[in-house]
Image: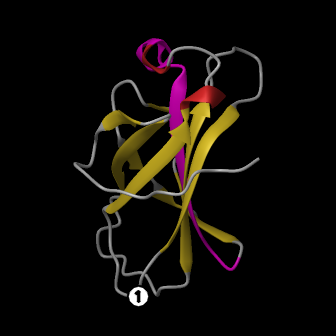
Amino acid sequence: MAFWQPTLMTHPGSIYSQNNGSVIQGKVISNDLTRIFRGDEILSVSINDTSVADAPSRTLAKQVIQLHRGQQFPIRYTVIFNKSRMPMDLNRLVASGGITMSATIERSGQLLYINDTRISLKNNRRIPVIRVK
């Protein structure tokens, strides 16, 4: 499965269309405001179709970001995905709460942060993550 790579940035917290794709922008946030990243961490942000009950979610798009030395929360993201991958109209799926977002931060394959609640694209573009102990 091929994912689109981000190519532009406008206002964090927006969703809009560009050619054949949709662009979703926002921030990954945490209460761990003192965390300073070393530069070898990887942030992954996924947009998922969770509209079908009792079925596995389907990843519609994913952005992988190499964090920089000294970077802190919040971390901005931009995810672009092809509308043709959508099972139905994006606006209808977003309005129903069937499109969700997830985020993880890893270092050398070890999970450092993850979101632990369902984050609907309908109401939010901010993805809160918690530190994994």
Residue drawn at (36%, 81%) of the image: 36
Residue drawn at (42%, 30%) of the image: 121
Q: Tell whether 107 sits left or right of 54.
A: left
- Say what amino acid the circle numbered 1 marks: Arg
Above or below, 25 relative to 112: above
Location of residue 110 by image quarter: bottom right
Above or below, 42 relative to 36: above
The spot of residue 55 in percent (x, y) is 77, 21
Crowding at dot 1, Cα within 10 Å, few <14 / some 14-19 / many 20+, comes out as few
Q: Tell whether 41 sits left or right of 35.
A: right
The spot of residue 51 in percent (x, y) is 62, 17
Q: Is residue 117 visible?
A: no
Above or below, 104 relative to 38: above
The spot of residue 42 in percent (x, y) is 56, 71
Q: Which residues are magenta?
A: 92-108
Residue 105 among magenta residues: yes
- Identify the secondary structure beneath mark 1: loop
Residue lying furthest left = 11
Residue drawn at (51%, 48%) of the image: 115
Q: Is residue 112 visible?
A: yes
The front one of 86 and 103 is: 86
Q: Which residue matches tag 1? A: 69
The spot of residue 43 in percent (x, y) is 53, 65
